[in-house]
Amino acid sequence: MIDQRFMDDLAKDSVLPTEMPVEDTMLAAGPVTSDVPQTGVRLGRAGVTPQQSAKAGGLDKPLIALLDTLAGAMRGATGAAIGLPGDIRSIVDLINQEGAEAVMGKRMFPTSEEVLQSNILPQVVPAGAPNAAERQKTVDVAQAVGEFLPAPGLLDVPKVVKGATKAVQATKGMPVGMSTQMVGEGVSELGFYSAAKEAVNSIQQPKGTGEQFLKQIEKTPGVKPEEIKWTGLDDFLKSKKTVTKAEVQEYLDKNRVEVKEVSLGTEKLTKKFSVNSPENEDYYDVVNKAGEVIYTGPEREADKLLDLDTTKFSKYTLPGGKNYREILLTLPSKNPEFDPKDIGRLNDLSNKTRTPVEDVEYKALAQRYDASLRGETSPEFRSGHFDQPNILAHMRVNDRVDADGKKVLFVEEVQSDWHQAGRKKGYQTSNAVKELHDYEFNLPTRAREAIKADFLKNGFTEAKADKLSTSLVRSTDFNGMAKYLDEVEKYTEIAQKAFNKDKLVPDAPFKTTWHELALKRAIQLASEGGYDRVAFTTGKTQAERYDLSKQINELAYKKMDDELTLSLGDGPYYEVVAVDKNDMPVLKRQVTEQELPDLVGKEMAKKIINGEGKGYPSESVSSGTKVFSGLDLQVGGEGMKGFYDQILPKFLDKYAKKWDAKVGMTEISTPNAMYKNMMGEDMKAQVQYIDITPKMKESVLTKGQPLFAVGGAGAAMQQEDNK
């Protein structure tokens, strides 16, 4: 709170009963900012009468006049406090501009003057406010902003950043333009920064070879190889004999990995009058927050859409949560750029007789060129869970209060459909095309040597064997040569990786660290939203949530006969039938062995492939059908337990150690008729949590977090598969 001695001194210096001249010297670091004439306390023995107050804006209550001026003073002092790091840096810049930037990087914090001239702090008095009642709200806000400050002249420099963070929170909820989030330069809207860009900023030499810059960046703590790969920074720098620091910075600005967010459940739809229908009924447009019209029709139908729940899986939550939403972290689709220099190569290849290797290159270039002309985007991944493309990871979250009375951002689930599919099916990578080119380039030579060796074994001379083998290779296609070398399977596998997009998943970053990306975003949301903790379920809770025995009565399956398998291809095939708790069939599907895990979960799929289960008791069912029921439907959920009980806590303990935070256990209430104990009391659920410590909040809100992994834990590959 504001120092009481400061308040007492102000009261002593206020002589309200007598009318006296008003001095011009304002209190503290900054003036009261308003277009309404101000009243209140001045330095020295000065005061104001009720008549002066009324004349100045209708403030006929001396206390309000005092608080109003005090609020303005606190705004000025707050501006000075927030701007102090910027003020200090500006002094350093004046002394040695080049040296300051080389050692400290570009100035991140604003100066006091910049703070006061911006919309960071709320104005003390709204424009045109005629009376005390209307002005009181802004006075209260300004007081809240100033709560953390000591008396003027006693500013505690080490507490400046802490105070600035409190100021940010104090302005939260104010109108647009009157609140702020203090984050550093180069931080994305989700609170992430590029460690590679930070490394480049810290390099002192203005110019050098590409290799020199790359080595300095790679050895900088916190820079991960994955970021260098996905920005293409290594290829860029290796191609440069000389490069400037500014060019590297510009390259990273243009090629940084951008992660975007879609938050389902927070979508606010609005309606506006559109036209009168032929029946003279008013029609309304329903508009999303992006300004897109998603529906036009009668008002009664438009009103129904305003309450539309855009979330997909709200039923898969523990009872008792509020403000449920689904947070999708996505990778924007990009239009593949076609390098102009490749046009020349494309023209050269089109006007000549191409070798098989050149023909592959020609087709790939032509395909890319056509795609760029059509404005097509890069390959997209689409999940079976959500409509949005390229979802790297998703979290399902809600708000709770735990047993310790802490406000909790509760993570019901965190998952990556993209990388789960990538692990199972493989990734479509650019390296696969290069691998195919290399294989095809070397195949003729290897085939010719093998054929020549056979001729030599059969008594042919060196010259004759060389001539015949060369002639045969020229007349044999790639499949023929691969077959001769007994490498048909290898060749097919490489070709499939390079060109068969239907079987493979588009390549993407965060293959083994997507869970770290999601949890860092949860920490950011919790820090911004004033939460005390981020909490998440245990593996046991996840296993129980998706336990088949709680959803169905029995699961029957039959391995299809060879004739059907051969007709459909990609065998073996299974027919799977599920019966719900009311003995009604809810699923009947024919799937391949590879598709089984996606349908019934990894552990149940393994049981089916191994032929487990009891013979079906009904004579009406064809022989060979087997069934799981009761306890046989229960699966261990070992993947879920390993992920939620080991992988997530291990990462958070390592990541948050620098902020004096570690993972702990607490309980949340699950108020629901189905979640009562024998005494009729609400059941409790054990959950894991990490505190949002002051140090963590300060760092996250002022600096941001590195986009790429800090731990490099590849254990996310053990992600739960029982979906």
Image: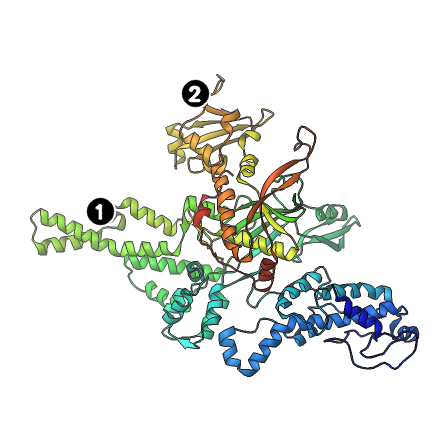
In the image, what residue occupies the spot 73% across and 64% down? 147
- Dot 2 surroundings within 10 Å: few (below 14), some, or many (20 or more)? few
Q: Nearer the viewer, residue 346 or 596?
A: 596
- What amino acid is labelled 2 in the image? Ser
In the image, taking residue 121 as reference, residue 520 lies left or right, namely left
Q: Position of residue 688 (x, y in %)?
A: 57, 44
Judging by the rendered image, the residue that carries numbered circle 1 is 485
Q: Is residue 613 above or below residue 319?
A: above
In the image, taking residue 135 as reference, residue 232 lies left or right, namely left
Question: Which quarter of the rendering shows the N terminus?
Answer: bottom right
Label 1: which secondary element:
loop
In the image, taking residue 445 as reference, residue 180 lies left or right, namely right
Q: Position of residue 155 (x, y in %)?
A: 67, 71
- Residue at the outermost top position: 619
Q: Quadrant of residue 291?
A: bottom right
**Do the residues under discs 1 and 2 have CB atoms within 8 angstroms?**
no
Chain-order first, disc 1 or disc 2:
1
Q: Is residue 127 visible?
A: no
Total label count? 2
Q: Is residue 342 visible?
A: yes
In the image, taking residue 563 as reference, residue 598 lies left or right, namely right
Q: Nearer the viewer, residue 226 or 458?
A: 226
- What amino acid is labelled 1 in the image? Leu
Q: For residue 645, which numbered disc appears in the image?
A: none
Q: Quadrant of residue 188?
A: bottom right
In the image, what residue occupies the spot 42% across and 22% down? 624
Judging by the rendered image, the residue that carries numbered circle 2 is 623
In the image, what residue occupies the spot 29% across and 60% down? 354
Q: Position of residue 373 (x, y in %)?
A: 47, 62
Separation (CA) of disc 1 from disc 2: 45 Å
